[in-house]
Amino acid sequence: QKEVEQNSGPLSVPEGAIASLNCTYSDRGSQSFFWYRQYSGKSPELIMSIYSNGDKEDGRFTAQLNKASQYVSLLIRDSQPSDSATYLCAVRIGSARQLTFGSGTQLTVLP
Amino acid sequence: GAVVSQHPSWVICKSGTSVKIECRSLDFQATTMFWYRQFPKQSLMLMATSNEGSKATYEQGVEKDKFLINHASLTLSTLTVTSAHPEDSSFYICSVSSGNQPQHFGDGTRLSIL
């Protein structure tokens, strides 16, 4: 079992819809959770971080964390074609310095 | 503004050449920097963790004599791909972090070996 799992997609949603991206992790010692967006040919950029159970909202983005069920999700409201990218889920396990990344979910927002 | 500066952004060179990539932390002193490699349509692969003032920690399967890492100061780490060959062509990305904070990535270096 991979430490961080994401559905590779591709996930397609129409413009204006809500895109829902999911991530599960295996290590209950995981403490910090991050979502990165990576456009084709570019490096990842941080869009959300979440550390405690519940929801965290930032503009059109909402991160949801459920440590009991070991999943973290990202909701993108009012999806735009410019949101089309690969979204990477990353987890810091315990006191590790490095992050463990999922393989990413490719999102396409159709105009 | 940018947290990490990485350059060059693009390198094309002949097989057998050694290529040096620089990664600078702009906003804070980074005792730890990370080097990743990403092949087309594949996920990020951690190559090594660069530690200031000590030897880098390499991931399994990454040749330390092939990929030389130097982290001589708190703001600069370099990755040298020695005697590069076409199979080393890839997208190399560095990142920095401090404490429990997320990693911030450089813009990456696209390496093409002819």
Image (tube, grey):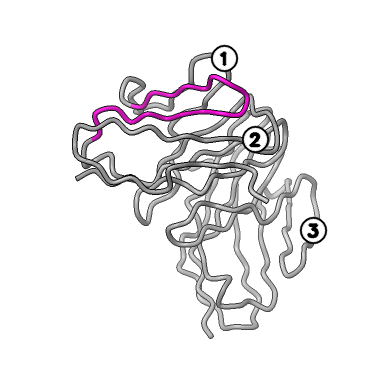
Q: CA distance from mark 3 to mark 2?
A: 24 Å
Helix, strand or loop for disc 2: strand
User: Marks 3 and 1: which is nearer the front?
Assistant: 1
Label placed on residue B53: 1
| Residue B2 drawn in magenta | no
Q: Position of residue A92 (x, y in %)?
A: 64, 37
Q: Residues within 10 Å of mark 3 (few under 14, many from 20)?
A: some
Q: CA distance from mark 1 to mark 2?
A: 16 Å
- For label 3, the SS is strand
Residues at discs 1 and 2 both on one chain: yes
Residue type (three-letter) at the residue carrying disc 1: Gly
- Residue drawn at (19%, 45%), measured in percent from left and top? B114
Q: Label 2: few (<14), some or many (≥20) within 10 Å?
A: many
Task: Check disc 2 and report the residue beneath it.
Answer: B97
Give the residues drawn in magenta, as a range: B67-84
Q: x%, y% of residue B64? A: 36, 21
Looking at the image, residue A106 sits to the left or right of residue B40; the answer is: right
> At 28% from the left edge and 46% from the top edge, which residue is drawn?
B12
Output the chain of dot 3: A
In the displayed structure, A77 sits above or below A96; it is below
User: Where's residue B108, x and y in %?
Assistant: 46, 46
Q: Nearer the viewer, residue A30 or B49?
A: B49
Residue identified by numbered label 3: A55
- Near mark 1 (Cα within 10 A), the count class, few <14, some 14-19 or many ≥20, is few
The amino acid pointed to by label 3 is: Asp
